[in-house]
Amino acid sequence: MRHRDGPRARRDNGLRTVSILTWRVALFSVIAMVALTTMLGRSG
Amino acid sequence: MRFWHQEILGTPFLWYATRAAGLVCLVLLTASTVLGVLNSGRLTSKRWPRFVIQGLHHNIALLALAFLALHIVTTVLGTFTPIDLTDAFVPFASPYHRLFLGLGATACDLLLVLIATSLVRQRIGQRLWRTVHWAGYACWPVAIAHSIGGGTDTGKGWDLALTLLCLACVGASMLYRAIRLISPRTVP
């Protein structure tokens, strides 16, 4: 299937990867921030 | 009568949030630096083409900026330290921890310049952008120095492990870049 392997498809897949990974990093960062704030609050 | 925001400002909650935001910002800045160095070393594969690495480098730098803003806002709003908004942007202006707070303000200014010039890259031209982007190599170590010297949690094991991990990641990417520079280029 040509359209699945063409440069345009590769570009679309790459952009999707960037988007998904960016959202995952953002979510992980927020969770880390909340967890660290809680941990620091408990340890004083 | 006290309002809800006065309740929050009066507790150390903002101080904990400041420290947490600073650490998350440092990790994001490290990730962005590593991706930037790998991209300049022309790392590419079928699964990770260069535009993917470049896009992630760009987006993670913007995320680091968001957490830097949070780090600054919680520091300024909190009553735990005598730091105001000027001290966050003007290096070495505050008498409070002058050196390490000054390094933090320097890293903040460098990051702002890096991101601003990247957003107008098409207008300012590739040469000027590249020259300014070399400041990125100064931004990260200055931020690390601010974290080590000014960080409240510096002596703790988990903070030391996190800092060493950041140093190892950037060191490894720099090594990769150096190897790519001295090895002859192969045409794929």
Image (cartoon, coloured by chain):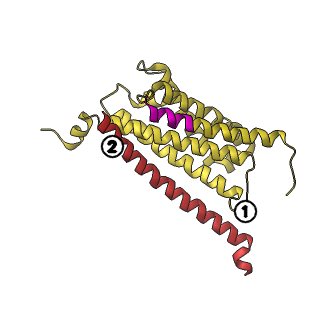
Q: Is residue B161 left or right of residue B47?
A: left
Q: Residue at x 18, y 41 (%)?
A: B3
Q: Name the kind of residue labelled 1 in the image.
A: Lys
In the image, residue B163 lies in the stretch drawn in magenta: yes
**Magenta highlight: main SS:** helix
Secondary element at tag 1: loop
Rendered position, A22 above or below A43: below
Q: Which residue is mark 1?
A: B46
Where residue A17 sits, quadrant-wise, is bottom right
Q: Which residues are magenta?
A: B156-165
Residue B44: image location, x then y, percent = 73, 55
Residue B95 disc label? none
In the image, residue B176 lies in the stretch drawn in magenta: no
Q: Residue at x 57, y 38 (%)?
A: B166
Q: Which chain is red?
A: A
- Seen from this angle, which residue lies furthest front? B157
Q: Is residue B3 left or right of residue B162?
A: left
Q: Which chain is yellow?
A: B
Can residue B186 be seen in this snapshot?
yes
| CA neighbours of label 1 inside 10 A, class few (<14), some (14 to 19), many (20+) | few
Residue A38 disc label? 2
Q: Is residue B49 left or right of residue B11?
A: right
Q: Name the kind of residue labelled 2 in the image.
A: Thr
Distance (Cα) linking label 1 and label 2: 41 Å
Residue B34: image location, x then y, percent = 63, 43
Q: Label 2 marks which chain's residue? A: A
Rendered position, B79 above or below B126: above
